[in-house]
Image (cartoon, helix red, strand yellow):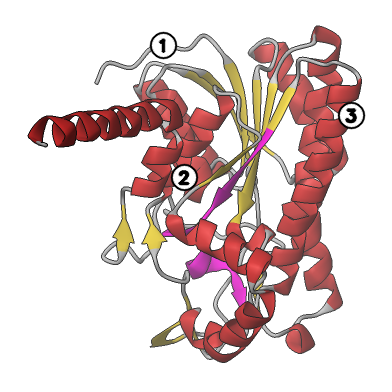
Amino acid sequence: MKLQKRDETVVITGASAGVGRALVREYARRQAQIALLARDPGRLEAAKSEVEAWGGKAIGLSCDVADAKQVEEAAATVERELGPIDIWHNNAMTTVFAPITETKPDEFKRATEVTYLGCVYGTMAALRRMLPRNRGVIVQTGSALAYRSIPLQAAYCAAKHAIVGFTDSLRCELIHHKSKVRVTVVHLPALNTPQFSWCRTRLPRHPQPVPPIFEPEVAARALYWAAHHERREVFVGGSTLQAIYAQKFVPALADWYLGRYGYEAQQTSDPVDPHRPDNLFEPVTGSYEAHGVFGQKAKDFSLQTWVDLRRLPVALAVAGSAVLGVWVFRRSR
């Protein structure tokens, strides 16, 4: 498929690995100008080289999104070197796999600062530049866990809930001011990313995403689509919709089910080294890219997402099929 070249400047936080790295590739294939924000200089340089290999332009900026000053300075550098920011993706995250009683206060604080406040600081930096121009798009990377929390990841679930609350407030304010700046949230399912190999954990066995598992490219395609289409929220994967509907209609049943099965669902059968390095406070070195270690279990396509991103043509096709079916039935009579 021939890809349209996009003359746009994009900022992606958490760009060096996981969903962020897959999203970088989605824009690189269209030769965009991309500002890569992450902490590890080595992976930033590798991601930058990928963009340039596709014919795009990139700058790598070592930045801890939990530091508002660093985020603001990065935004200023982007506009100085690449020009006005068109799209800002708040994607950086971190998590702790542990029961609440075994999670330390500084770990809650750090997970909240990166996952939630990093999104707030990125949004504020983008707004300072987009509002005076009255244009631009801010895309928040959400999660099914923003609506339905699970055990062992309280800090992460709470941060994703907070992103939804923050974004809803912002959307109302943009409407009030009749601003053309747009904000959207893309809620993701379980993904095969490196986070399960480098997250902080106190579980006895290796953490894993709760099946069904999707490859990060499924998320990246939805995030790119959301940045270029008018949609309040995008839900990726049938499992994301199931989690949201369970919380809406049978929350007590969901509590019971996750309390009974949620611990096992988030662990493999392999023991984990409790002293392995993690990326909560410092980046972990290594050749981590977009994918994690669950490739054999991961799907690279979501029918639900494919349909959701094509609502109008799918609706027309269904309606046309229904009309044709009625016509054939009547003719047969």
| Magenta stretch contains residue 55 | no
Q: Report the residue marked by disc 2.
A: 219
Q: Which of marks 1 and 3 is nearer the N terminus?
A: 1
Instruction: Name the kind of residue labelled 1 in the image.
Output: Lys
Does residue 187 appear left or right of residue 115 in this picture?
Answer: left
Say which quadrant the C terminus sits in.
top left
Q: Do the residues labelled 1 and 3 touch (CB within 8 Å)?
A: no
Crowd around label 3: few <14 · some 14–19 · many ≥20 (10 Å): few
Question: Comparing marks 1 and 3, which lies closer to the viewer?
Answer: 3
Q: Give how far across and how far down residue 96 sits, in percent.
A: 66, 72
Instruction: Note whether residue 33 is visible.
Output: yes
Q: Report the residue marked by disc 1.
A: 5
Q: Which of 168 and 242 is in front in this view?
A: 242
Q: Report the residue marked by disc 3.
A: 173
Label 3 SS: helix
**C-alpha span from label 3 to label 2:** 28 Å
Does residue 12 appear left or right of residue 313 in this picture?
Answer: right
Label 2 SS: helix
